[in-house]
Image (cartoon, rainbow, N blue to C red):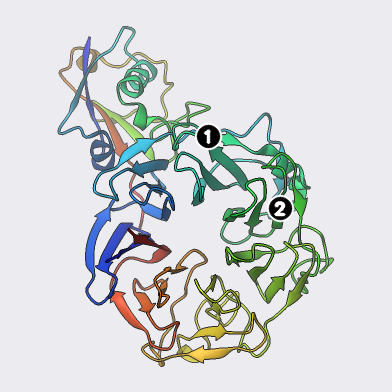
Amino acid sequence: MTVRIVLPAHLRTLTGVKGKVFLEVEEPITQRSVLDALEATYPMLRGTIRDRATLERRPFIRFFVCGEDWSHTSPDTPLPEAVVTGAEPFMIVGAMAGG
Amino acid sequence: MSNVRVLVGTRKGAFILTSDEKREQWDVSGPHFGGWEIYHLKGSAVDSNRIYVSQSSGWFGQLLQRSDDGGQSWEPVNNDFAYEGNPGTHQWYDGTQHPWEFNRVWHLEPSPTDPEVVYAGVEDAALFRSGDGGQSWQELPGLRSVKGNLWQPGAGGMCLHTIILDPNNPNRIVVAISAAGAFRTDDGGETWLPINRGLKSNFELPDPDADVGHCVHNIAMHPSQPDVLFMQKHWDVMRTDNAGEEWHEVSGNLPTDFGFPIAVHAHEPETIYVVPIKSDSEHYPPEGKLRVYRSRTGGNEWEALTNGLPQSNCYVNVLRDAMAVDTLDSCGIYFGTTDGHVYASFDSGDTWAPIVSNLPRVMSVEVQVLP
């Protein structure tokens, strides 16, 4: 399936991506499978979204899906159909921080 | 004619300043990596176009970048700093033991002989080495075995911030760690010794003469006499003449011996520079006067250098990696401030002027003289 991913601006600069990322991801489509595919395609992202060793989300990273915050949802929970079909993006967001 | 390149790491990106050897006109490029904290960037002495950059952010963690064209383009290299084995624990602020956790790279030290070899000093304190230009990193874990369980973070974190590579002996490395002390290896990093004899940390350590635990801020060496090291400790400016076997204080007539950076003149091994700061809780110069102090006698006798520096209402700091010297015949001295100025002197410190102003908080300054 082709999943649309929105990266924060600094990670678009790092990867050289302009606009959204379109990635082929094998089902089941979950946070983990999407991030695994993303890091396999763009190895320079390893460690920037998830901890390299534990694969846990970095504290100031958020995942938004269909208008909801999925940051605290299990990484193995299947993502909504709208993300699987590419109708809605999987959004990786830098958390509000900095005062 | 040579050119000079000044590499400035700031809280919000890197800046590269270039000039010809007259050092009168400076071109400023940047910010590179805008928005990221650049703790340090440094060029290789054997390939001046190769520059390594430590790039970090509270959002996205630690990245390492490398340029092979003098900073015109950059390539991410490996950011996997995995401690060897189970790193165990170190002391925490409350006296409990805390797991060793990688936070960031404070300092990058390229080999003076091989552009592919570079060392990284990290927080929580450890030393890593790359032999392939940053594509992979291996820890030198013997360092942590020197009572690492007794080390504890200072206010800035438990960071390995100083790496001195002996130009004559590739097996000798000296490192310094905040609130742990100075350490030396003579076998390429396999085994390490604490080299803190003579340091006194009254009111900072329960045993002021402890063999580890001293808050070393920076160490400098002149390549012509690698056994002579100069140290800016939390308080006290220190000197050793035997590679750290014994230190003695050379604070002399400084108005305060607290500070962060220390540097040695490129052509006068006994001429050293510090920037006295009022105290550990008041991170600004005494009397609101920004003064570099120079000793031409290897310490003890110091003179204030003020010409061209703000002498009223100046309350900035100069961080530990934010002072450097160039190797031109008339040695240039450079330092960056927390209010975003980089000052330079091209007459050994007699007169100063800013070469760039209004940058973000300056974290590091390094200089390259280009062929």
Whether B238 is drawn above or below B242: the answer is: below
**In the rendered structure, the residue with mark 1 lies on which chain?**
B
Q: Nearer the viewer, residue B315 or B113?
A: B113
Residue found at x 43% / y 75% = B331
Element carrying mark 2: strand
Q: Residue furthest front?
A: B1
Visible in this render: residue B233? no
Tag shown at residue A80: none
Quadrant position of residue A5: top left
- Quadrant of the drawing holding the C terminus of chain B: bottom left
Residue found at x 59% / y 84% = B295
Type of amino acid under label 1: Trp
**Image location of residue B264, percent across then percent down:** 54, 72
Whether B291 is drawn above or below B141: the answer is: below
Which residue is the site of mark 2? B184
Q: Is residue B362 left or right of residue B157?
A: left
Type of amino acid under label 2: Arg
Visible in this render: residue A67? yes
Which residue is the site of mark 1? B137
**Image location of residue B146, percent across then percent down:** 77, 47
Name the N-terminal-most of marks 1 and 2: 1
Residue found at x 77% / y 57% = B212
Element carrying mark 1: loop
**In the rendered structure, the residue with mark 2 lies on which chain?**
B
Residue found at x 44% / y 90% = B306
